[in-house]
Image: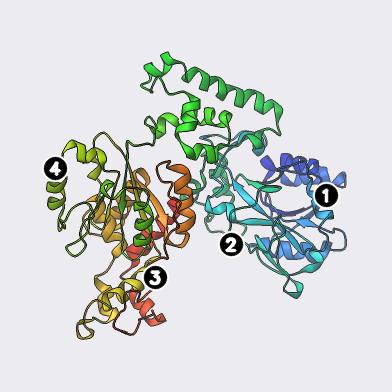
Amino acid sequence: MCAFVKDEARYLRPWIEYHIKKGFEHFYIYNNDSTDATVEILKEYEKKGIITHIHFPLRPGQYDAYKDCCMRFSHESQWIGFYDIDEYLQCMTNLSIRDFLEKNLGVPAIGIHWAIFGSGGQEKHDPKPDCERFYHRAYKSFFKNQWIKSIVNPRLVERVTDPHFFFYRNNASTLNTELKHIGSVSIETPTWELFRIQHFSIRSKEDFQYKIERGDTLHIPDKPRHYEWGYFRRDDQNQVIDLKQVSTFPQFKTYKIADEINRVDTMLMPEYATKHTLKPSLNWQQYLETYPDLRRFWNGTLRARIHYALFGKNEKRALPISDNTIIIFLHIVKTGGTSFREWLHSNFAKDEVINLYEDNLKSDHSERSFKTKKNIKEYFESLDDCEKERIKCVSGHLVYYGIHKYFPHKRPIYITVVREPLSLVESLYNHIKSRISKEKTPLFVDWVKTESPLCKYFCDFFGIPHHYNEQSLRQIITNIRKHVYILHTETLSENVSSLKRQISMLQSINQIPELNTRVGVHNKENIPITFLSPEDINSALPYLKSDIELYKKIIGEIS
């Protein structure tokens, strides 16, 4: 195994010992001018013949160190894993990494996906090994879990340009543990069935501050580390208590997990539930049965019990997702929303749905059309209690946050679909061209100056002024985080599958219709389609800055 280290003394020894137990025979440690006890620890293991210690002061130097390792030690090692000290290889079955590699000698490299572990709320450094300290991780679908680290055949490496991904001779490529070709970031769900890399990228807050102060060995020297507190917040993913992780350490499992289970059992006592305003009749089995997402992510009653204790109260999950739920869909133009709406409505009877669209798009529920929130308010206030009880879905361009207040006995779930802004405005511009005369069609460069569709819809939705500044973006993201289930145009079919697992009332067997997002889809008059040229993109970017920033933040949230 090869690692590039700088001032990692507090983490180095347990990392080495852990990987010795996993079958690694030798370590090539490139020391980047460490000033702590790193050198002393390396000398200790070097005397035992376990480590080759290379002083490597070049900064930035990680790529060069990896390249040097492949060139210098390819005659010594058949396989070399390139990992950081905050990455631990975990075997998910009884198959060892050594046995797996011996069965696949002909491949150039095996890429193993990350599993991102959060801080678990820890503030201070603890000298225990990382894999004993942290057992809260991200959902498997968290975007950084798609990244890999590789175990490579060093004789086949041609060049190193990225710590996650090497280039190999004869255009060979990295394979995952299912022996399928992948890049540095796979576009598929991470493969954890055999192995995964437990990545403790942030550890505790004190550890992360130490990480910042150590400086960056990957990029420009003497500049602040590219890891900042925004990075910490992004990677502080604690949704899953990973029992597979802690089962390797019996003493940890005994004291930590047992404490959590005892706390669960205490919380589920009726007198505790009454005292803490939890629903007394709701026990952990009901909790598991009520929320299908727990069946997906927690895989068993023990995990559900722990989740109930740790997160149930904070999530305010007190009502089942049933007939008391109302789905409220904000339809943003040219995002695939029409296709999603068709599928969504297929879950309900016609008289269970209200559409809120502009003049020319009549409501399925009535012959009325809507122009303003005042019209909508008057309409909802005109419905009697029996009509309101029947409604299960509201959708449209004119949907806004707060509609659920007209249905006080229902639990609202707000949903919308977002799309990459440049693709959205390209499609929207062609949609507009197809609906007005050629003479009245504005040039794209003029039209785009007045468009920020993503920000506009969300500002209207949340009742935020159209300033499109940092403050309004923060308000939008805060509200999305609290209130809105976001789907993504590019993965809409997968999102719908996930939605069906999490919301029991959405179980239509219909497939999502073909997405109505491509440019010129309504072009019935053979009007030439406009595809954005580099010049168009450059002219649009300044005006879409807010939309692009908002989109990036939203994607960060849903990832």
Give the CA distance from mark 3 to mark 2. Answer: 32 Å
Give the mark, 3 or 4, whose residue is nearer the N terminus. Answer: 4
Label 1: few (<14), some or many (≥20) within 10 Å?
few
Q: Secondary structure at mark 4?
A: helix
Mark with earlier residue (2, 1) = 1
Eyeballing the image, is 240 above or below 201?
Answer: above
Residue hosting label 4: 381
What number of labels is visible?
A: 4
**Real-space CA distance between mark 2 and mark 4, rounded to the nearest whole angstrom:** 60 Å
Element marked by disc 1 = helix
Label 3: how many Cα within 10 Å (few below 14, some 14–19, many 20+): some
Q: Earlier in the sequence, mark 3 or mark 2?
A: 2
Q: Quadrant of residue 487?
A: bottom left
Query: Between tags 2 and 4, which lies in front?
Result: 4
Of mark 1 and mark 3, the one earlier in the sequence is 1
Label 3 residue SS: helix
In the displayed structure, does residue 28 sit left or right of residue 210? right
Residue 415 horizontal side relative to residue 69, left or right: left
Select label 4 or label 1 by which is in front.
Answer: 4
Rendered image: mark on residue 99? 1
| Callout in the foreground (2, 1) | 1
Question: How far is disc 2 from disc 1 in space, using C-alphas?
Answer: 36 Å
Question: In this view of the protein, can residue 359 be seen by the observer?
Answer: yes
Q: Amino acid at mark 1?
A: Asp
Q: Could you say which quadrant of the image residue 12 lies in?
A: top right
Check disc 3 and report the residue beneath it: 423
**Which of these two is toward me, 72 or 151?**
151
Q: Position of residue 348 (x, y in %)?
A: 34, 47
Name the one closer to the observer, 23 or 263. 263
